[in-house]
Amino acid sequence: MKKFRHCLFMGMVGMALLGSGCNSDNEEVEPVIPALELEENSLSVSDNGGNFSIPYSIRNGIEGVLPTLSVSGEVDWVSGFEVDEHAVAFDVARNKSEKERACKVSVSYPGLEAGIDITLTQSGAVDREVILELKHVDATSITVDVVPSDKNMTYFLMLEQAQTLIDYGMTTDELIYESDVRWIKKSLEVGVPIEDLVSLGDQIGLTYRGCLPETEYVLYAYGLDITDYSMLTDLVKINITTGEIELVDVGFDIQTHVAGSTLTVDVTPQAGYDGLYYVDAYEKPSFDFGLGQGQTVYEICYSNFESTLEIYQYLLGIPLEDALNMLALSGPGSREFTERKGGMTYVVVAFSLTDEGIVNSEPTTVEVKMESTEPESSNILTISVSDVEARSAILNVTTTNDDPYILLELDPVVFEGMTDDQIMEYILSMYYWGQDRSGSYTEELTGLHPETQYTYYGFGVKNDQPTTRLFTCSFTTSEMIYSDATIEVKWDKYYDVLDIIALEPSYQETLYGDVLIPVSVVSVPEGCKFYFGIFNKTNYQDDVACMDYLVGYGKTEESTYLNAYYDIEYEIRGFAVDQDGTWGRLVKIPASFKKENVSDAQEFIDLQKS
């Protein structure tokens, strides 16, 4: 009716002035006003905070235009505003205070006279805990219940050997926590999802398998805020010692038969043993390496069999009983090992198993050497070096034919007490993966350490077998001579990464760590090439190794940024190279960063825009 009256009025005016009538083409259309509705206008959240979203609907909206979010007043605990076509979302920081807090988040849209407010209320902090209860322990497994008082709280849970914690200096709750946080941050940097690093909710009957017998373990847990990595609870831990395996007194008669690259092993249990047992063949060099690391024969066999069983059970999804039927023998039995390395010595082992797949006897071992199936080569390697300096040398290799060979630089200490045949066998077992060479060549060796002995080992190889005798060459690099070139590093401010991302989310894809440090670097004298970076004070303590790393991965810009974490002792290190290519000495500048000393993140963002 309103539109009709309006048209009639205009028509009367028109007739009075022009003598014409009302025309429907001239009818005025009222402006369309958007209507915005939120599914919720209030939200109460726990002191944990988190990410929250509220669905919305809009009528008469403008195509391609989304609502915008803002928060009233000086509120620093609501951030990360995001809007899509269906919902608005934001992050709420953890409330560390015991007091409840509230604010209003406003949702605005073009054409609306006023935004719609979301009343946001967050409860004050409450006491929380993680309860650990040991339910079962035997020689190889530990079962526990893990019950957090707050089912929505993320927490960190870890089982470690007690000796490992001591070896890595994790002797207090604080040191354990600091080490965990560093590990979590490094894992995130390489793409591990945070969900794979922390736990949520109850874990009843959680079982850790593959534990070592008669070994003390520490199970510990604490609530962890995954936004700032602060502890939400005290660290709780329980010490658990695994049980002893009752070993049965059984031996095995082992007969071996070699035919080409196939090793056949016939086994007969002794003393009337009719239970399960397992047979395997290890390359002797790798077996001896384990012994050299302090492992017993039992521990080597136990560890290898547990790994094999885990592959069948957890990777292939084969039930334990079926896996043991496939792997184990009973009574007189035989196993065939194909594609063994010619000329390699193998340690054949046999040991008994419980019905649960636990190694429960001392292994019986015999050694057997495989036949060499490749003919000898007449190739003679002549290995020499020239132009030996502190950091480089020229390696020269000549051969008498084009038969394949291997040439590696290795530490002679590894081979003390070995014959040449044993050395070649060890190299093929531990260091060889098909990196053959052929013919003569010359190579410049760079990145060497001053005043250091290097030894090259070479011999003919085909199908994992030696085909010549062993050839060696040793040399020692000269003393390092440094130039007077150096660098000056300047920095005086640093910014919190999360603060920057909260103000400018686009930085989330490029920034990492806790802090961003703008630095400027100049060489003395000017015009020299230089390399620099930031290091944990305990890493790369050898100056030459650190300089090598910087040449490969260091920064070379006069003005750039460094990334670091809070409360770690760092050193900004670098060096210059003079016009003649001679390195200067490594410069080390101590640095550490505290949350309370950061500069305003808005300052950083403004500098980038200027």
Image (tube, grey):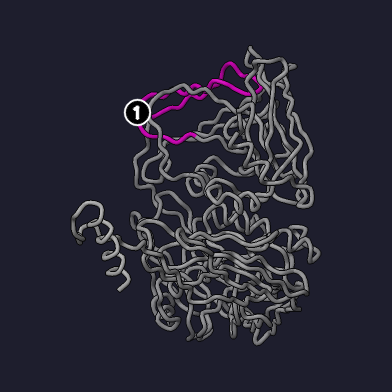
Instruction: Write down the region rendered in magenta.
Output: 379-407
Residue at the image point whose x is 42% and y is 69% from the top: 35
Residue 122 versus residue 266: which sits nearer the camera? 122
Q: Is residue 101 left or right of residue 114?
A: right
Residue at the image point whose x is 74% and y is 34% from the top: 491
Q: Is residue 286 left or right of residue 332?
A: right
User: Residue 123's quadrant in the figure?
Assistant: bottom right
Looking at the picture, how far across and down is residue 481, in whole percent?
72, 18
Q: In the figure, 552 relative to 584: above or below?
A: below
Task: Look at the image and tell me in which quarter the N terminus lies.
Answer: bottom left
Residue located beneath label 1 in the image: 402
**385 magenta-colored:** yes
**Farthest residue in the front direction?**
16
**Farthest residue in the right direction?**
172
Residue type, numbered disc 1: Asp
Q: In the figure, 435 relative to 504: above or below?
A: above
Residue at the image point whose x is 61% and y is 28% from the top: 557
Looking at the picture, how far across and down is residue 571, in whole percent?
75, 39
Label 1 Cα neighbours within 10 Å, binned few <14 / some 14-19 / many ≥20: few
Residue 1 visible somewhere in the drawing: yes
Q: In the figure, 421 relative to 526: above or below?
A: below
Residue at the image point whose x is 53% and y is 34% from the top: 457
Task: Look at the image and tell me in which quarter the C terminus lies.
Answer: top right
User: How many numbered marks does the figure carry?
Assistant: 1
Looking at the picture, how far across and down is residue 528, in whole percent?
65, 17
Residue 298 visible somewhere in the drawing: no
